[in-house]
Image: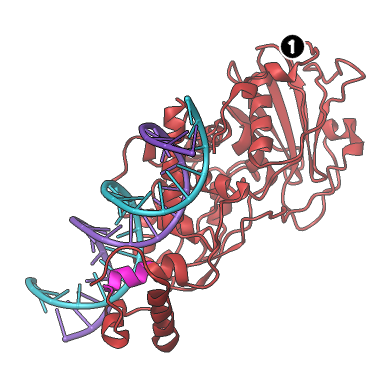
Chain colours: A red, B purple, C cyan
Amino acid sequence: MRKGPWTPAEDEILLEHVRRHGEGNWNAVQRLSGLARCGKSCRLRWANHLRPNLKKGSFAPEEEFLILRLHAQLGNKWARMAAQLPGRTDNEIKNYWNTRLKRRQRAGLPIYPPELQDAIRFGRRLQRQNQASQGTPPPPLLSATRHQAQLPPLQLPPLLDLVSFCPQLEMTPPPTSHPCQLSFAFPVPSLSPPTTPTPSLLRKPQMGLCNYDFNPPTLMSPPYAVKMELPSNQLYQEAAGGGGPRNCGLTEPLLPEPHPLGLEHIKTGELLLLPAVDDHAVRWGNLFCAGDYDCGSNQEGTMETPLQFDFGTEGNGEALGSRMKDMAEFLDLPAPVVLDWCNSDNTELSSAQPSTVVVGEDVAVDMQQLAPSQDWNVNSWPWSNMPGIC
DNA sequence: AAGGATTTCAACCGCTCAAAG
DNA sequence: ACTTTGAGCGGTTGAAATCCT
C-alpha cells in the first residue's frame, strides 16, 4: 500500500473508478482498479480533493464568520460545520480553525470576537428567559427557540445567521464610559405589511422602516445544505440529546445544543432546507447585545417589537462602536455612516448629529445615550490597535 | 541571499458507530 | 447476541510554502 502524497496518475485512477462504480465501497478500489491505496485513503482523497463542486482558495469573510458562529454553537464538529459550508471540507475548516486558534492564543486574544461573545451571552439570556417563561407565550419575534419550534420536521435547527446580514453602517460612538441604552425597533414578521409606526419611528419617518424585507439578504450563507457522508443518526446524534463526551477548554461549545426536530429521518445526500434566516432583531441582538435586555411589544403586539438593550458598564458607546466597527472590518464592508446621539428623553443633543443609525434600507436602529456627545478621534478607538483576528 | 520560524495543507491514525453476516 | 466490515470523525503529524530577520 502506498502512503503519502497522491500523484496525478493515482488521482486519475481514482476518478475513473468513481466514474465507473460510484462513490462508496472504498475498500474495493484497490481490487477493482489496481490502485495501491487503502480504502480510507481513497475516501479521503475523493472527499477532500477530487469530488466535484469543491471550493478552492481561501475562505471568504462571510465564510470565516460563519465558521466562528458555528464553532461557538457546535464546538469541534467539523463535519457538521462543513455541511453548512458548501464546497468546503471538514479538513479545511479544521485547519483554518486550528491556525486561527493558535494565532489568537499567541496574541492573547479571546477565541471569539466580541460581537460573537455578545451573541453567546444573548443566546444564553434568551434560553434562560424562555425557560423562565415556560407556559407563557414567548415575547414576540425575539425568541429564536419559538422560531425553531415552528419549523417543520427535517429542518436543521436555526442558525442565528449573522453572516447573511451585513449591514452597511457607520457610527460615531460617544466618547465616555457612561452607560447607554439602545432601542431597537423592528417589525415582527407578518403576512401583512406594517401599518403603524411606533412613536420612535414617527420621530424619524424618513428612515423608511416599514419597508421591511422578511427574507433578509443572503450574501453567502445558502439556504440549503447537502448532507454529506454521515448516516443521519450519526450526524445529529449529539444534537438529538445523545450527549457523549464534551469538549473541554477553548474548544468547548459555548451555546447549548439545539434540539432538532425529526432529524433522525434525514437521508445521506438529502438536500436540507435550512430555516429561514432569523429576524433582524435577533441578529442585531446577537451582534450587539452585551448585557441584559428587556423586550416587549407595542400595543398591537404584532407589528413591531421594540427591544431595550441595557449595556451597563460594558455597553458604553465605545464598546458598541467597537463591535460595529469590528464587524464591518471583519466582513470587509465599506466604512459606515452616521448616527446621532440624543438624550434619554429623545431630544437630540445636536442638530448636526442625527439620532438614528441607518442600516441599509431595511431597518433603523434608534440610539439613545446618557452622556453628552463630542468629537471622536477614530484613531483612539480600541479597535485601532487590535491585531487582525483572522 | 540565507536560514530559521511560522503557517498551511494534505494525509494518516485511532477511535467510534451502524449495518451486515 | 456477537463479530466483522465499512465508513466517517476528530486529532495529529510532517512536508512544503511562506514569512521574517
Q: Is residue A378 above or below residue A36?
A: above
Looking at the rendering, the stretch of residues picked out in magenta corresponds to: A37-44
- Report the front residue among A126 and A276: A276
The picture places residue A343, in percent across and down from the top left corner, at 80, 16
- Give the quarter of the image for residue B2: top left
Magenta stretch: residue A79 in it? no
The picture places residue A83, in percent across and down from the top left corner, at 48, 61
Residue drawn where x is 89% and y is 16% of the image: A350
Q: Amino acid at mark 1?
A: Ala
Which chain letter matches label 1? A
| Magenta span main SS | helix
Q: Quadrant of the N terminus of chain A?
A: bottom left
- Give the quarter of the image for residue A333: top right
Magenta stretch: residue A43 in it? yes
Left or right: where B2 falls relative to A311: left
Q: Is residue A229 visible?
A: no
Q: Residues within 10 Å of mark 1 (few under 14, many from 20)?
A: many
- Report the front residue among A364 and A381: A381
Q: Is residue A2 above or below residue A371?
A: below
The picture places residue A204, in percent across and down from the top left corner, at 89, 32
Residue under label 1: A371
Residue drawn where x is 47% and y is 29% of the image: A110
SS at mark 1 in the image: loop
Left or right: where C10 falls relative to A311: left
Number of numbered markers = 1
Q: Quadrant of the C terminus of chain A?
A: top right
The picture places residue A341, in percent across and down from the top left corner, at 80, 20
Residue drawn where x is 45% and y is 45% of the image: A97
Q: Is residue A289 visible?
A: yes
- Report the front residue among A204 and A217: A217
